[in-house]
Amino acid sequence: MKIFSADQMRKADEVTIQSQKITSLELMERAATQIFNVLHQRLQGAPIPIHVFCGIGNNGGDGLVISRLLVEHGYHVKTYIVNFSDNRSEDFLANYDRLKSLGAEWPIQLKSEEDLPDIQQQDMAIDAIFGIGLNRPLLPWIINLIKHINASRCFTLSIDVPSGLYADKAPDDPEGVIYASTTVTFQLPKLIFFLPETGQYSQDLEVIDIGLNRDFIAQTPGQAELIGKNEVLSLYKPRYKYAHKGDYGHCLLIGGSYGKIGSVVLATKSALRIGAGLATAYIPECGYEILQTSVPEAMVVTDEEDDYISNVVIDFDPSVIGIGIGLGTHEKTVDAFGKFLKQNKSKLVIDADGINILAKESRFLEYLPERAVLTPHPGELKRLIGDWKDDFDKINKTKEFSKKYDCVVVIKGANTLIIYDDNIYVNTTGNPGMATAGSGDVLTGIITGLISQGYDPLHASIFGVYLHGSSGDLAIQETGYQGLLAGDIVSYIGKSYIELFKKPEQMNPQA
């Protein structure tokens, strides 16, 4: 599913109005009616006080339509106009008049902190103050209104986006944003719902189809791509009856140091579990018995040093190499890593200390093969590309880095981002239980194992991140968040493949 920018959404509205020969007022009525239908289906006429906060632009116009429909269906509604300017949109004014014509309680005008209404925790608030067009800091009294709504702890539904969020940068005041229990957004999701600084403001997200022009949406490249089951199914490479292990590549996992051999165990298991034909682990001598015992399906080659990697000597041509897991940053290891990069001809996945070494020894970056995959967590990314102002700046700097070194960057975390060139892919699987030691090592093995089978590095990253998250989602049904271990994620990789081909009625509703 595409993710559109604010400008692209405005253009989609314009094209829809022209192609369907409707007015903007009619489109507003259609969109707001869809939200009302969602509300009405859930409330079923429940006699709870509903507070509708309307700005004076088109987002406020949506709120006025919802208010009118709620009144018409017998709900107990109070409508508030948040007067932050003397300017009103034409569609807002039209719907303001329609609401007043019902003879219902007139909308209450809010102009300062003295006007803040009483809201109880058992009430409901509908946030229609600002939409995706917000482009200036909020007035202090508006921030206090938002804090007042949040402090009530009532169920809050935001229309399109939680008020106080910009479409393309972090909020000026983190407390000046509505914390929405649910955000109902129009037609396509927005990038702000999936970034750490802005995604936290929407506890739940629902995307509703309001009938925007489908040709425009299909023909317009999105700001980003949201990755779900439909997107990854098209990447899947089925196996054929007469296949043998040689058809699925021979991957090499290089890493480990004294006390950190477990990371290579996890990565090697994952590479095999995801479907690599053969896997070899290259580790220090101290890990030999651990690897041979823990992963009997793998082959093991050891370094001449006992506790760390000092010299990478490979006597075969691997399909792909995953390097960096548990590697450490010993002086000899850093030197060996640089020499390895300089002579390497294989496709490459780099994680953990491999990234830390690249950050410290930036001259090594020129040795990266084309479309190498780097899998940093935010701390490793910061060491690699430098600090950033906000998540949007982080994305832009990562794009620049990706283009400069022709590499795929996988930024691990909730809604893991895959960035290549100017393209952004946002993952939808995974859960908080995966914030556990070794989870990233598993991902490195998964991506390495997919490339081994012939997947393009970018496709392997997209598919791999999805399967990694899906495995974690399946595992927590048995372990819960706190009980999840990285090894559990490995155990559910096979089931994550099976889940891809289940019909909705076959799927566990908790998945």
Image (cartoon, helix red, strand yellow):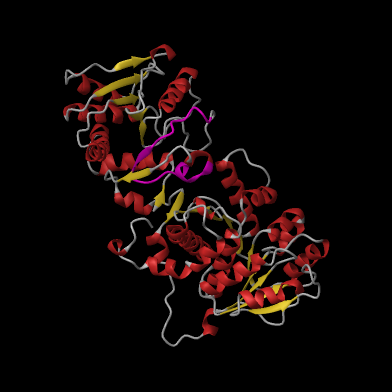
Question: What x and y, as percent, mark residue 21?
Answer: 22, 40
**Quick check: 318 above or below 424?**
below
In-image side of 309 versus 102 (left or right): right
Residue 180 spot, x, y in % from top left: 40, 35
Q: Is residue 84 above or below residue 185?
A: above
Q: Is residue 33 above or below residue 439?
A: above
- Residue 11 at x, y = what percent? 37, 41
Residue at 81% x, 65% y is: 335
Residue range in magenta is 174-196
Q: In the rendered image of this protein, does residue 317 appear above or below residue 310? A: below
Q: Residue at x 36, y 32 (%)?
A: 156
> Residue 190 lies in magenta, yes or no?
yes
Q: Could you tell me if residue 284 is visible in this image?
A: no
How many numbered marks have been drawn onto this rendered protein structure? 0
How far from the left and from the top, in percent, is residue 137?
51, 25
> What is the quadrant of residue 184 in the picture?
top left
On screen, residue 392 versus residue 164, left or right, reads: right
**Residue 347: in magenta span:** no
**Whether residue 129 can be seen here:** yes
**Residue located farthest toward the bottom when viewing the structure as drawn:** 242
- Extreme right residue here? 331
Quarter of the image for residue 365 reads bottom right
Q: Residue furthest top?
A: 114
Q: Quadrant of the C terminus?
A: bottom left
